[in-house]
Amino acid sequence: MNWPIAIKKATKLATAVIVSASLLASLSYTTFAATHRVHEQVNTRTEQDIYKKWQQYLPQAFNSDQLFEVEPKYSAPYSAGQLKEQVLQDAVNATNFARYLAGLPDDVTLDYSLAEQQQAGAVLMAELGTITHYPTKPSDMADDFFELGRTSASSSNLSAGRSSLYNTVFYGYMADNSGSNLYSVGHRRWILNPDMKKTMFGLAYDPSSRYRFYSTMYAFDRERDEDEVDYQYIAWPSAGLFPTDVLTAADPWSVSLNTSMYSTNQTDDIYVTIHRARDNKTWTLNASNQDEQGDFFQVNTGGYGINFAIIFRPKDIGAYTDGDAFEVTIQNLYTVSGEKTSLSYTTEMFSLQSSFKNNATRYALSGQQLKLPVHGNATRFTSSDPSIASVDRSGVVTAHKPGYVYITVDNYLPAANSMVTVNVNDSAYSKTSGWASSSIIQANEHGILNNSPYYQDLTTPVTQEEFVHYVVGMLKALNPQLNIDDYYDVKSPFTDVRSTDSGIIWAYEQGIINGTGQGKFSPDNVITREQAATLLLNVYKYLGGELQPAAQAAFADQGKIASWAISSVNQAAKLSIMGGVSDTLFDPKGKYSHEQTIVTLLRLYQKFAE
């Protein structure tokens, strides 16, 4: 009956003797003995695998009056209180989801023998109004309660100011992106400690204390058999597929290396390169990069779970987007046998939660319905005030009365484009042609419009300035990351356009518009139909559209089209971006209206939208 245990112990001893002799021998041993292989986990799972796990570990929302089975007491005589079971389960779900994403076993359980200790630690932090691993004893606190709280503080991840334990795990501990945390990412490394099998949380809520919410997470557990997890390294974000929802541009990357394979004695020359496939941009980081607000690099061999971590962060990496792929290479590593080596892996980003395709304000009339387009398969929509506008499970918004309302999609974790403002008006004061009405509603649903379509006569001619603003709105709807604010203080190329009109300056720089001569743009000039065709073709080409061989359009007034506009008119007709005013007439000198602008920009949007 005891043979398997005896053999296992003997194997451990043998490994301890030979581990420094050969990296190959070490790898061979762990592959034989381990039951959970990190490399296989992160490199074989699919988006659907991760999504299923996400559904298993979805975060919950709790109001401050829903946290406790027994309320803590924050003055003498102090008491720890008791968290509700669902609050604790929410916290361990976050822990297990983080471990799953890193490729580790996601079977950590709650150690209820530590419940009072962890609660005492949270109450102690609330009384002190700060978080510290070395607390001082409040004069009115009983010795035994203080010792319980002090034990918690000295063995836990600590956080303040976050009401949700789930968010604390991901945006506090796993993020580790501020101050001294950058140098060790210690909270993260304790959560990603392969040996962890149990934990427990504490949470205090004292509205009179500085940060109101204080939490503890027991971090020193090492109950898992060390041979159960086979890993060469544990990375955050991991190799393979990784969700953008739990990573911000401020968060450092980290790679914790197995010290039975890699030497901690030769680390001075280690450097990292990160290559992003989207734009072929490469960052190289080494020990000279120590900017806490920018490019950062650190090797840490402190005892935070795995005691060898390489930490790095490019300052201008920007928001992570769906489809981003990064190749990470770490150079000048050494094996325990002294051989120089390196490691490389690729991280592919995807969005776990659904999001609105853009977060532009939408406009509605009382009684009207809007369908807000989203990326992905949304699991829930919510309205901040259903009496103003409600939203059903499929994302259809129904406006009820005037006011502003915020519609969210999923939004379990903070994410870009997860919220849209809907402005509800009581009645329309606009004029619209019947043929354009449905397209204007669609343009509004897609977030193309910068202003409400219900407060102006859309049949009137559009000016050059207004046309540009419509174009910018459509392009931002296609690409929410488009930022024209950098052009806010750029010197205007036109004497009749202020340098603060960044939209016009940006459009000029992109080749979408030109001036009208003598250094002027003439922003108040209305646009003719032949001018509109030229501008729309410029937008089409800016978006990467390919021109097609186009025969001369069969318009009876073709001879009235200016020579500089003929090609654009023919192309616009061929591409079904812009047609004539009838089957036989184009009316090149006719004025272009607001509604015509909206309809044709909607057609462009639909050509390039995902």
Image: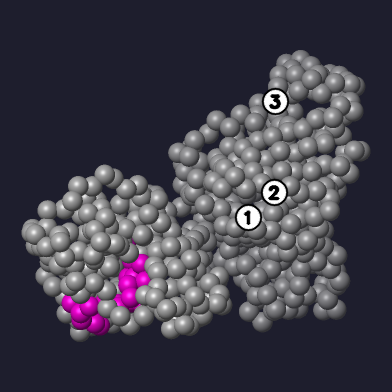
Cα separation, mark 1 vs mark 2, equals: 9 Å
* Tag 3 near tag 1, CB within 8 Å: no
Residue at image point 80% right, 55% down: 289
Q: Which residues are magenta?
A: 445-472
Whether residue 578 is situated above or below residue 30 in the rendered picture: below
Whether residue 36 is situated above or below residue 201 in the rendered picture: above
Name the quadrant of the N terminus. Answer: top right
Q: How many marks?
A: 3
Q: Quadrant of residue 325?
A: top right
Cα separation, mark 2 vs mark 3, equals: 35 Å
* Tag 1 near tag 2, CB within 8 Å: yes
Reading the image, the residue beneath label 3 is: 34
Asked if the magenta segment contains residue 461, the reply would be: yes
Magenta span main SS: loop
Reading the image, the residue beneath label 2 is: 283
Badge 1: how crowded within 10 Å, few (<14), some, or many (20+)?
some
Residue at image point 36% right, 80% down: 523
Q: Residue 482, how many percent across, how many down?
A: 48, 62
Q: Amino acid at mark 3?
A: Ala
Reading the image, the residue beneath label 1 is: 317
Badge 2: how crowded within 10 Å, few (<14), some, or many (20+)?
some
